Structure formats: C-alpha cells, structure tokens
C-alpha cells in the first residue's frame, strides 16, 4: 500500500467526486481512478459506491478513512519533526476553534505564531466542540480550542485553559431583569430559550446543568453564531444561558448569575492528539499559550 494511494483515497472521500479530487491533487482523472482501483484490489473490497453525480463510501471505505487520515497525519508530523530538529519549523498548523472561545484570543495567538514561524502555513476551521474533537482524533486538525466534551482517550487528550460560570442574558425589560438576583434552573423552566446547536460547548454545558437539576427546557430559537444569539435576546425574543464573558459583547443586555447548577462550569481546553502524535507546530502554539500570548498579540 503506497502513501499516494491513501492520499488519493482521502481526497476522493472528502470531495465525493473524482473530477474535483483530481483537480485538487493536480493529477489526471484516469490516474486517480487507477490509483483507487489499485487500492481496492489490494484490500479486496470496493471502497466507493460510484454514481454519475458523486461517489460515496462503502462500509469498508468508512472503516479505512479514519485510519488513512491518521496515517497521513503521522507522516506529515514526521516530516515536520525532522525540519524542527534542523532548526526551522515548516509545514502546516491546522487549528480548530469554537466561536468566541473563553480565555484565548485566537487572532492574537495566531499572529504571534506567524511572527515566530513564518514558514508554517496556518489553516483555521470553526465548528462545534463535538466536531472539533472528532477532527483532532482523526488527525485532520493538529489541535483545537473547545469545550471539554469527553474524558481523554488513546486518540485525544485535553489541556485545561480556563473555566467560568454560566450567566443568563435577557432584555432589560424582561421580568427577570427587574429582580436583578441570581436565578435557578427551576425559575427558568418556562422561559423561551435562545441557544446554539447541540454540538456547541455552551449548549452542552447548559443542557447538562438543567438535566442535573431535573428541569426540562425547550430551545425555540437555535443559532450557529454568537451575534445572532445576542440579536435575538436584544429583541426580547428569548433568554440565553451562556459563558460569563459573553455579557461583555452586548452591554445593553442584563446579565444574571445562575445558581444551583453544581459543577456546571464552562471549561475551555486545548484538544490535542497523544504527545507522541502531536505535531511540532501544535507544540509551538501550546508554548505560546503557556507564555500568556493568548491574552493578546
């Protein structure tokens, strides 16, 4: 099995199209098709279901994809490690992050990283914490700034960065705002909620806190970006339970502490592969964080 076969396989799996994958790889479509057929012959099973419009993975293809991505990531890390020993950090830093992550000034730390390592190409992907964890475990990302979603595994570890309590945001004319006191999940049970997609860290924290309190809530307005959430609350269309630092993004809203949620704290972590699989670029970025560069450029 050759590395180029795995590279070609992953490209077709990502694009779900032979022509687009061939263009991206800058190879002929016939050459790409021959490479995939050679891999299928070696494994003695079809890897794709081919149609006139697109290709999809077979069960065997899905099983191979994760392993192929990890192998290619390890090969890339090996090349970068050799370059680092030679005194120059090269290659790619593939970083993932949730929006408005607590405790990390992502733009600032990336700017500092680029100043120190100008030969490294930076790639950034924004997504929910669950998806980011999967991307790091699969080797598609070097690291990610996210909410702690699970215990450490053989393929994923987390380094704690910061933690903060959750806060209720509501319109100044909302009935909760007039009291100005801390509220419990029980007191919020009948409210209309604005929240993120279930894959997001803040949503997971809130869902966990309410479930622990035995309070059922319904998210009527679901969004995938912070500003939309704040706009909806600002129009008094619902309330939101969010990490405390969100209150500084819209000073006109009323912020109330949440009590009675036990250990419901939003914890920001850096998600990384095991130490032996962590790329030199990821280690360099973590070094910047340890120096406090995440607070600004």
Image: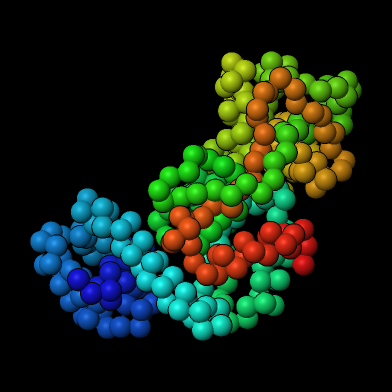
Describe residue 275's horizontal placement relative to residue 144 as left or right.
left
Q: Nearer the viewer, residue 106 or 246?
A: 106
- Do we see residue 263 in this rendering? yes
Describe residue 164's horizontal placement relative to residue 60 as left or right.
right
- Total number of numbered labels? 0
- Residue drawn at (37%, 71%), measured in percent from left and top? 75
Residue 258: image quadrant is top right
Colour convention = rainbow
**Figure quadrant of the N terminus:** bottom left
User: Residue 167 at x, y = what percent?
Assistant: 75, 33
Residue 104: image quadrant is bottom right
- Do we see residue 15 in this rendering? no
Q: Is residue 211 above or below residue 106?
A: above
- Residue drawn at (68%, 23%), measured in percent from left and top? 261
Q: Is residue 251 above or below residue 124?
A: above
Q: Is residue 165 above or below residue 209?
A: below
User: Residue 225 at x, y = what percent?
Assistant: 65, 49
- Residue drawn at (63%, 81%), measured in percent from left and top? 118
User: Residue 265 at x, y = what percent?
Assistant: 67, 34
- Residue drawn at (41%, 51%), measured in percent from left and top? 155
Q: Which residue appears farthest toward the front when viewing the image? A: 85
Q: Is residue 228 above or below residue 27?
A: above
Describe residue 277's horizontal placement relative to residue 229 as left or right.
left
**Figure quadrant of the C terminus:** bottom right
Q: Nearer the viewer, residue 216 or 146?
A: 146
User: Residue 23 at x, y = what percent?
Assistant: 36, 79
């Amino acid at each position: 099995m050759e590395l180029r076969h795995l590279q070609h396989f992953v490209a077709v799996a990502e694009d779900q199209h032979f022509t687009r994958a061939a263009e991206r790889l800058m190879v002929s479509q016939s050459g790409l098709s021959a490479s995939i057929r050679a891999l299928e012959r070696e494994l003695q099973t079809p890897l794709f279901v081919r149609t006139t419009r697109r290709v999809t993975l077979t069960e065997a293809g899905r099983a191979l994809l994760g392993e192929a991505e990890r192998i290619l990531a390890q090969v890339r890390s090996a090349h970068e490690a050799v370059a680092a020993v030679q005194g120059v950090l090269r290659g790619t830093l593939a970083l993932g992050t949730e929006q408005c992550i607590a405790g990390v000034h992502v733009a600032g730390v990336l700017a500092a990283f680029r100043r120190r390592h100008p030969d490294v190409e930076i790639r950034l992907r924004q997504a929910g914490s669950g998806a980011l964890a999967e991307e790091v475990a699969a080797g598609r990302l070097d690291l990610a700034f996210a909410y702690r979603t699970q215990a450490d595994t053989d393929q994923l570890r987390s380094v704690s960065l910061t933690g903060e309590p959750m806060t209720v945001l509501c319109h100044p004319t909302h009935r909760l705002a007039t009291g100005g006191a801390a509220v419990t999940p029980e007191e919020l049970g009948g409210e209309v909620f604005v929240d993120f997609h279930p894959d997001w860290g803040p949503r997971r924290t809130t869902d966990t806190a309410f479930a622990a309190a035995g309070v059922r809530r319904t998210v009527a307005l679901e969004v995938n970006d912070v500003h939309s959430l704040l706009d909806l609350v600002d129009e008094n269309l619902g309330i939101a339970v969010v990490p405390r630092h969100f209150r500084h993004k819209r000073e006109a809203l009323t912020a109330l502490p949440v009590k009675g949620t036990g250990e419901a704290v939003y914890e920001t972590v850096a998600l990384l592969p095991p130490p032996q699989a962590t790329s030199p670029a990821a280690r360099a970025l973590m070094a910047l964080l340890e120096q406090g560069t995440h607070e600004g450029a």
